[in-house]
Image (cartoon, helix red, strand yellow):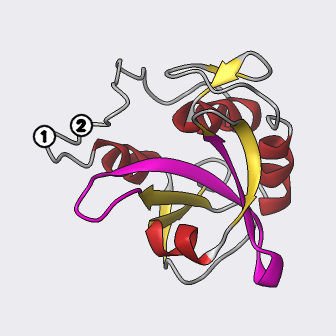
């Protein structure tokens, strides 16, 4: 699938309210739910059952659960090689676990990303310097048949 298809699917979720642990377009999702929904729309059935998770994303234990899960199903790429449709993984504070996901919408001077954000729902935000500094990994969806 192309970056254009991924971005179009992600933008189709804009306006979905933020609901922790949910993944239903128009009704509610969190950042992981957004990615799960895009996966279902473009790839079919989700590759694993998602266990319940808290909003702290295993931060007290220091476990990089979200990063590990992304590494199982997505293809890691160089953080500096941005492309539309990339899945971005963010560390929200220094020394914390990576616990936020988004999809690169635009690249270049007007770079943006689509994400589900507490209190805002699914939005497309500028990928400003503070957000760029928080990116710890960049992934792409696997090619068809992988």
Where in the figure is residue 77, as x and y percent of width and height? Answer: 50, 73
Occupied quadrant, residue 141: bottom right
Residue lying at the far left in this picture: please name it. 61
Tell me the tag on residue 61: 1
Where in the figure is residue 128, as x and y percent of width and height? Answer: 65, 72
Give the magenta part as a residue range.
Answer: 92-116
Q: Identify the residue at image location x=24%, y=37%.
A: 58
- Number of numbered labels in the structure image: 2
Considering only vertical position in the picture, is 55 above or below 51? below
Where in the figure is residue 74, as x and y percent of width and height? Answer: 50, 53
Considering only vertical position in the picture, is 146 above or below 134? above
Determine the secondary structure under disc 1.
loop
Magenta stretch: includes residue 20: no
Where in the figure is residue 54, as x and y percent of width and height? Answer: 33, 25
Determine the secondary structure under disc 2.
loop
Occupied quadrant, residue 29: top right
Magenta stretch: includes residue 109: yes
Q: Identify the residue at image location x=69%, y=36%.
A: 120
Answer left or right for 64 relative to 144: left
Residue lying at the far front in this picture: please name it. 119
* Nearest to the observer: residue 76 or residue 109: 109
Q: Identify the residue at image location x=67%, y=68%.
A: 127
In the picture of the structure, the residue carrying the numbered disc 2 is 58
Occupied quadrant, residue 84: bottom right
Q: Are marks 1 and 2 in contact (CB under 8 Å)?
A: yes
* Nearest to the observer: residue 75 or residue 23: 23
Considering only vertical position in the picture, is 113 above or below 24? below
Categorize mark 2 by other alpha carbons within 10 Å: few (<14), some (14-19), many (20+): some
Q: Identify the residue at image location x=63%, y=47%.
A: 145
Tell me the tag on residue 12: none
Categorize mark 1 by other alpha carbons within 10 Å: few (<14), some (14-19), many (20+): few
């Amino acid at each position: 699938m192309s970056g254009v298809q991924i971005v179009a699917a992600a933008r189709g979720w804009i306006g979905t309210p933020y609901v922790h642990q949910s993944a239903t377009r128009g009704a509610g999702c969190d950042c992981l739910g957004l990615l799960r929904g895009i996966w279902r729309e473009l790839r079919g059935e989700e590759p694993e059952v998602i266990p319940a998770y808290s909003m702290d994303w295993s931060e007290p234990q220091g476990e990089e659960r979200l990063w590990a899960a992304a590494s199982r199903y997505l293809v890691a790429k160089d953080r500096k090689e941005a492309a539309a449709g990339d899945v971005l993984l963010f560390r929200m504070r220094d020394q914390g676990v990576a616990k936020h996901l988004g999809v690169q919408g635009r690249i270049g001077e007007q770079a943006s990303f689509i994400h589900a954000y507490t209190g805002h729902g699914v939005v497309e935000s500028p990928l400003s310097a503070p957000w760029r500094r928080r990116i710890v990994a960049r992934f792409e969806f696997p090619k068809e048949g992988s």
